């Protein structure tokens, strides 16, 4: 769930276009925290301007902004009058969090070209942090043109007036914002926060209530409204607002923490307490929207500026870490997660993600040790237990994983099974890989019944796993094919699921049908060794033996699992043996008792990356997006 809607996304898009216009749209963002300078000593400068430029360009393409910042800085030394080079250096320094150096570059850019919007935005942020509200307003006024840029500049200008204690001018500035619905929501939300900061209680309540009434499914709006109501003694309204949000996103850590405090009679601090925090909230909203859209560079730029203004903004820190995580900048992501304050309700979420990321880095033993330590501190937390099970399953410790998932399932509150359907799915896959098919089948069926209809991709994964497993055991053939075709209909661009349908045809001896589907699967996911191996088998069976050997060789070159590699080598040497006569087809189901089927399949069904199968605890700003690392076939 995005933190903010259309207006924030439009403004984030404006920055994307600005960066693209300078040739920097592809320069990636990867960094940990706002810092005064980059650790440049680890990068050896090239001996020429051209060498430094090429090194910087390659570093950017490799999503390493620390190296890009270092080499661009050296390149600027070699050609200090090159405005484009200076702008590239500025953006890379800003994205990497080298704020002092970035501001210095912004000063030079603004001197040469006063209309440079990003440079003016950065300088305005620095001035606002220093309490220089008049100069900050001037910089924001020069920070861009167009509706989206006006939104950013207008909101930040209003906060600069609020910092100077001029509430009237702040309101007048905000009232200039007119347009589509989400412009109005964004305006009312910040108008309410400004009114609260300057002590105008009646206006704060009116504007925050208007924003909440317009959008009560966005966490920051709900949190700002509820905290204000709690602060003026209307605890019942605050509890109602949080409780309604719980129906949309259960067990969100910030909401759980706020409800626990309210029910215990404890006060809640205001969401925003200063003009600096308010401006950071503007930039955070834009960064969150850009991150949701996949605009990583503008997202990180906005989040860097937000954290410069408000280093304790835990949600901005987590959003930065999550953005880096999705960009596969895992080491830097973990450093950002580690910097979330221990007092924040989001700290546990961050600790879980650190463990999962350690597994992604191939440091599985560290991941297990880390999550074991987190579990000792939170022994009854389902999210921690589930994350530990996910790492165990990824490490092929399938029996241990089933025990861990069982521990989590035993903690599910009555009536909440549907909210935890993934636990049954994960345990089912672990049982299947451990050779306990009957238990696996029961869990997979339960997961299929529990998965919400609003998650079609997730349903496709469960259908795929269960149906493929049946086909591989020569069971429930007609039902399996119906389910696999349904999975394909739900995820028609998922090469893994189409591979399962093709492989099911292959297992039944329907070679031409297998070739048709497997060719589609390879087209959708050409880099998967398993799919290429399957297509090679299908080609061989249809007599296209030269093409079959080509696909096997291609699969071999794609780094398959060691067991699969041995099988591929054997096929490259001797081909496939003559097939046994199929005992069943989709029109001719097997007559054997399913209970007497083979105890484990020859090959495990794919479970591709799917944003609806969470990899750990829920992300604080939106439903989690991560892969279920199921071993390939």
Image (spheres, helix red, strand yellow):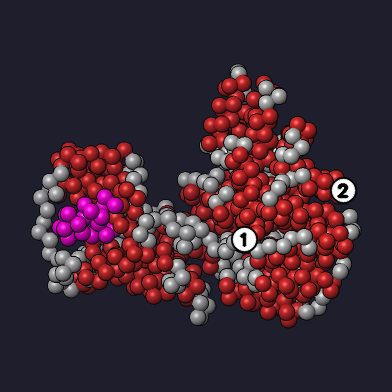
**Residue beneath the point at 76% across and 56% down:** 155
Query: Which region is colored magenta?
Result: 500-520
Going 25% across and 66% down the picture, which residue do you hit?
481
Give the farthest residue toward the right: 165
Looking at the image, is 469 positioned above or below residue 309?
Answer: below
Labelled disc at residue 188:
none
Q: Percent position (x, y) of residue 315? A: 67, 58
In the depicted view, which residue is nearer to us: 381 or 290?
A: 290
What is the distance, in whole Å, between disc 2 and disc 1 at their CAs? 29 Å
Of label 2 and label 1, which has the lower sequence position?
A: 1
Q: Is residue 354 visible?
A: no
**Which residue is drawn at the image coordinates 63% and 51% (left, top)?**
12
Give the residue displayed 30% in from the left and 52% down from the top. Answer: 521
* Above or below: residue 23 compared with residue 338: above
Q: Is residue 91 above or below residue 434?
A: above
Give the image quarter of residue 253: bottom right
Q: Local crowd at mark 1 within 10 Å, few (<14), some, or many (≥20)?
A: some
Asked if the residue under mark 1 is in contact with the one under mark 2, i.e. CB atoms within 8 Å, the reply is: no
Q: Quadrant of the N terminus?
A: bottom right
User: How far from the left and from the top, in percent, is residue 333?
Assistant: 59, 48
Q: Position of residue 450 (x, y in %)?
A: 42, 74
Of helix, strand and loop, which one carries label 2?
A: helix
Q: Judge from the rendering whether residue 179 lies leftward or rightward of residue 607; answer left or right.
A: right
What secondary structure prevails in the magenta region?
helix
Residue on which the image places disc 1: 6
| Residue in front for this viewpoint, 517 or 46 | 517
155 left or right of 167? left
Residue 540, given in percent of the width and then of the height, sits at 16, 46
User: Of helix, strand and loop, which one carries label 1?
Assistant: helix
Q: Quadrant of residue 54?
A: top right
Residue that badge 2 annotates: 134
């Amino acid at each position: 769930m995005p933190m903010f809607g259309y207006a924030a996304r439009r403004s984030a898009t404006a920055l994307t276009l600005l960066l693209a216009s300078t040739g920097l749209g592809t320069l990636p963002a990867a960094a940990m925290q706002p810092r005064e300078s980059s650790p440049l000593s680890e990068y050896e400068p090239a001996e020429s301007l051209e060498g430094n430029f090429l090194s910087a360009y390659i570093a950017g393409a490799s999503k390493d902004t620390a190296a890009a910042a270092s080499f661009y800085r050296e390149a600027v030394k070699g050609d200090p009058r090159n405005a484009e080079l200076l702008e590239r250096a500025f953006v890379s320094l800003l994205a990497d969090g080298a704020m002092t150096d970035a501001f210095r570059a912004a000063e030079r850019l603004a001197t040469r070209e006063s209309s440079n919007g990003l440079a003016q935005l950065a300088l305005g942020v620095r001035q606002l942090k220093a309490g220089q509200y008049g100069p900050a307003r001037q910089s924001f006024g020069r920070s861009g043109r167009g509706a989206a840029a006006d939104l950013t500049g207008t909101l930040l200008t209003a906060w600069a007036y609020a910092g100077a204690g001029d509430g009237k001018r702040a309101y007048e500035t905000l009232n200039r914002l007119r347009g589509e619905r989400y412009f109005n929501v964004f305006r009312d939300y910040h108008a309410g926060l400004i009114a609260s900061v300057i002590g105008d209680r009646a206006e704060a309540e009116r504007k925050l209530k208007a924003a909440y009434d317009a959008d009560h499914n966005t966490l920051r709006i709900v949190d700002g409204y509820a905290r204000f109501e709690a602060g003026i003694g209307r605890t019942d309204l605050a509890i109602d607002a949080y409780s309604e949000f719980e129906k949309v996103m259960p067990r969100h850590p910030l909401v759980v923490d706020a409800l626990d405090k309210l029910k215990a009679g404890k006060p809640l601090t205001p969401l925003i307490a200063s003009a600096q925090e308010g401006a950071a909230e503007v930039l955070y909203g834009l960064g969150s929207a850009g991150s949701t859209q996949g605009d990583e560079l503008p997202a990180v730029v906005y989040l860097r500026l937000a954290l410069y203004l408000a280093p304790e903004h835990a949600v901005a820190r987590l959003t930065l870490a999550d953005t880096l995580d999705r960009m596969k900048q895992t080491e830097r992501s973990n450093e950002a997660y580690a910097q979330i304050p221990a007092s924040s309700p989001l700290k546990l979420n961050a600790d879980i993600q650190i463990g999962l990321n350690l597994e992604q880095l191939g440091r599985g033993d560290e991941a297990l040790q880390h999550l074991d330590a987190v579990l000792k501190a939170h022994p009854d937390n389902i999210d921690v237990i589930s994350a530990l099970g996910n790492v165990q399953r990824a490490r092929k410790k399938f029996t241990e994983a089933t025990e861990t998932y069982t521990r989590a399932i035993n903690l599910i509150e009555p009536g909440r099974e549907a909210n935890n359907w993934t636990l049954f799915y994960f345990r089912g896959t672990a049982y299947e890989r451990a050779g306990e098919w009957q238990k696996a089948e029961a869990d997979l069926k339960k997961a299929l019944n529990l998965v919400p209809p609003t998650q079609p991709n997730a349903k496709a994964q469960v259908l795929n796993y269960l149906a493929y497993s049946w086909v591989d055991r020569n069971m429930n053939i007609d039902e399996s094919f119906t389910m696999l075709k349904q999975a394909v209909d739900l995820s028609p661009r998922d090469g893994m699921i189409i591979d399962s349908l093709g492989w099911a045809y292959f297992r039944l001896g329907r070679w031409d049908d297998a070739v048709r589907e497997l060719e589609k699967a390879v087209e959708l996911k050409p880099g998967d060794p398993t799919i290429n191996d399957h297509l090679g088998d299908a080609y061989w069976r249809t007599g296209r033996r030269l093409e079959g050997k080509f696909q096997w060789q291609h699969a071999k070159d794609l780094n398959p699992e060691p067991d699969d590699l041995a099988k591929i080598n054997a096929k490259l040497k001797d081909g496939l043996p003559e097939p046994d006569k199929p005992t069943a087809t989709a029109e001719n189901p097997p007559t054997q008792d399913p209970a007497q089927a083979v105890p484990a399949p020859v090959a495990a069904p794919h479970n591709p990356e799917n944003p609806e199968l969470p990899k750990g605890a829920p992300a604080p700003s939106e439903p989690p997006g991560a892969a279920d690392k199921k071993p390939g076939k």
